Image (cartoon, grey):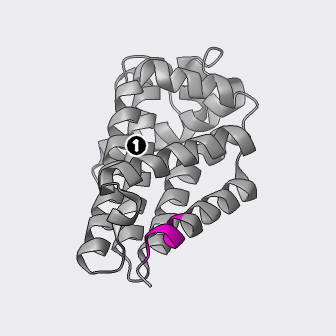
């Protein structure tokens, strides 16, 4: 990693903590610079403004969790266990710190305003990865999508819709983990070849 990349990483780490502490609206470039241990002028050498910092943080967070998703899906083992791990990594990797913030809702809204394209692209890549895992499981004879008259992409979309619903209905933490586990058991019961 280059020196510039290390500095950007350090700034984004500091910025996340500041955004969680003060919320998006109340955070200033000076707050971010101070948290990163640099002058505001030095911060402007790396980012144009607060929006740029926020978008870069969103992009990095999504890239990190998508790498975790890919790693989970590449592991050996039953497809629904791998997908459960992947979905948990995706949700918890993106939500853990922000959900714990008293400004979580404001930060989620800011993300959809400032970084909607990043979020939507990451969700599309997640659906593609889950659909690929389902297609591989079907090709191996482990599952039968025809039992529910759906294709892999439709089932992957359903998975994502379900975890979104769980996030809003139950909050995070253990209840979300339990909900995702239940969803995978239900899908397994419907699709696994016996």
- Which quadrant holds residue 178? bottom right
Which residue is more in the foreground, 63 or 87? 87
List x then y, in percent, for residue 159.
48, 52
The quarter holding residue 129 reads bottom left
Residue 102 falls left or right of residue 159: right
Check disc 1: other Cα within 10 Å, few if <14, some if 14-19, many if 20+. Answer: some
- The secondary structure making up most of the magenta span is helix
| In this view, 188 is above or below 142 | above
Image point (34%, 71%), residue name: 144
Horizontal and vertical percent for residue 128? Answer: 29, 51
Residue position for label 1: 60
Residue at position x 44%, y 35% from top? 58
Q: Is residue 43 magenta?
A: no
Quarter of the N terminus within the rendering: bottom left
- Residue under the image location 35 percent in, 56 percent down: 149
In percent of width and height, residue 78 lies at: 44, 80
Q: Decide which of 133, 102 is in the foreground and name it.
A: 133
Say which quadrant the C terminus sits in: bottom left
Q: Quadrant of residue 132?
A: bottom left
Q: How many marks?
A: 1
Report the magenta residues as a range.
187-192
Query: In this rendering, would 143 be left or right of 106?
Result: left
């Amino acid at each position: 990693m280059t020196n510039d990349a290390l500095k950007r990483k350090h700034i984004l780490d500091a910025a996340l903590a500041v955004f969680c502490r003060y919320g998006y609206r109340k955070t200033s470039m000076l707050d971010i610079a101070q948290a990163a241990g640099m002058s505001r002028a030095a911060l402007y050498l790396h980012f144009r403004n607060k929006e740029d910092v926020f978008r870069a943080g969103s992009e990095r967070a999504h890239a990190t969790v998508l790498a975790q998703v890919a790693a989970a899906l590449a592991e050996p083992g039953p497809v629904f266990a791998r997908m459960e791990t992947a979905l948990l990594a995706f949700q918890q990797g993106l939500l853990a710190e922000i959900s714990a913030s008293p400004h979580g809702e404001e930060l989620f809204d800011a993300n959809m305003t400032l970084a909607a394209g990043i979020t939507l692209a990451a969700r599309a890549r997640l659906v593609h990865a889950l659909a690929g895992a389902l297609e591989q499981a079907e090709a191996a004879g482990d599952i039968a999508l025809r039992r529910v008259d759906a294709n892999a992409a439709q089932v992957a979309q359903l998975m994502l819709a379900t975890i979104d619903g769980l996030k809003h209905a139950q909050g995070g933490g253990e209840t979300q983990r339990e909900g995702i586990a239940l969803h995978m058991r239900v899908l397994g019961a419907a699709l696994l070849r016996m």
